[in-house]
Image (cartoon, helix red, strand yellow):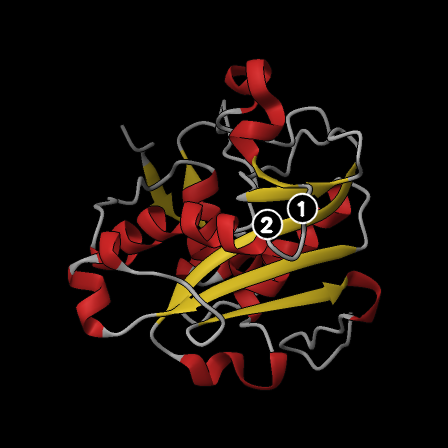
Amino acid sequence: MAKEWQYGENNKNIILSEPPKQKLRITGHRIASVLGLNQYQTPFGAWCEITKLVKLPFEDNKYTIAGKTIEPLLIDLARKKFPNLMSIEEYYGNNIEKYKWNNFIDDSNIFGGIIDAVATKDDLKTLTMIVECKTSSKPHEWSNNSIPLTYLLQGCEYSYFKKLDRVLFICAFLQESDYAHPEKFIPNEENTIMVVKKIKDVVIEMPDGRLI
């Protein structure tokens, strides 16, 4: 149940009936909104979500269903270039229940999220790279090996807390027919892109013009 609230003086702020007892974490999906860099959600909207002032409804749609269906196929494709690449379930193995809903439970009390896959050294334990799998119907957003900003920030956040300097983005470009039958999609070099980004080379321009 959402908390009760009222407008403050001059309607410039809101006052909660009580402080939030439990807050959601700042995940990779929320970090762009928190920084004011998400065109679909404001920092205030992120705050409402994180403090549970408003519980946003969620229903699977053709985009989320396609993403879930195709993600394992993208991981299999990436293994051809990165042999020690595995899904997060494979990486945690018998400990997956501890990390199932938050892969950063040991790294931060504020930030969190769920990684799609990871690459490791030959010991299959030491992480070398975060892997993020995406699907898109807008290949122009990925032209010249560029990464959409919300995804880039997600990869940077996850890499930072795992003390890594690289993130691999895998994106499959789908046609409308692929959304209708994602189980039939076969990723290959023609319809899928892989881009490795070094975190130290990432520069983000903030809404006020500052570079971070």
**Disc 2 marks which residue?**
79
Left or right, 18 with respect to 55, comes to right
* Quadrant of the snapshot with the N terminus: top left
**Disc 1 marks which residue?**
83
Cα distance, mark 2 to mark 1? 5 Å
User: Which numbered tag is attached to residue 128?
Assistant: none
Question: Based on the displayed image, in which of its 4 quarters is residue 108 positioned?
Answer: top right
Determine contact: label 2, label 1, CB under 8 Å: yes
Residue 42 pos. (x, y %): 46, 63
Q: Residue at x 26, y 74 (%)?
A: 175
- Amino acid carrying label 1: it is Pro
Give 191 or 144, whichever is nearer the viewer.
Answer: 191
Does 92 appear above or below 43? above
Residue 171 pos. (x, y %): 48, 65
Does 21 appear above or below 54? above
Q: Residue at x 43, y 80 (%)?
A: 139
Residue 8 pos. (x, y %): 43, 50
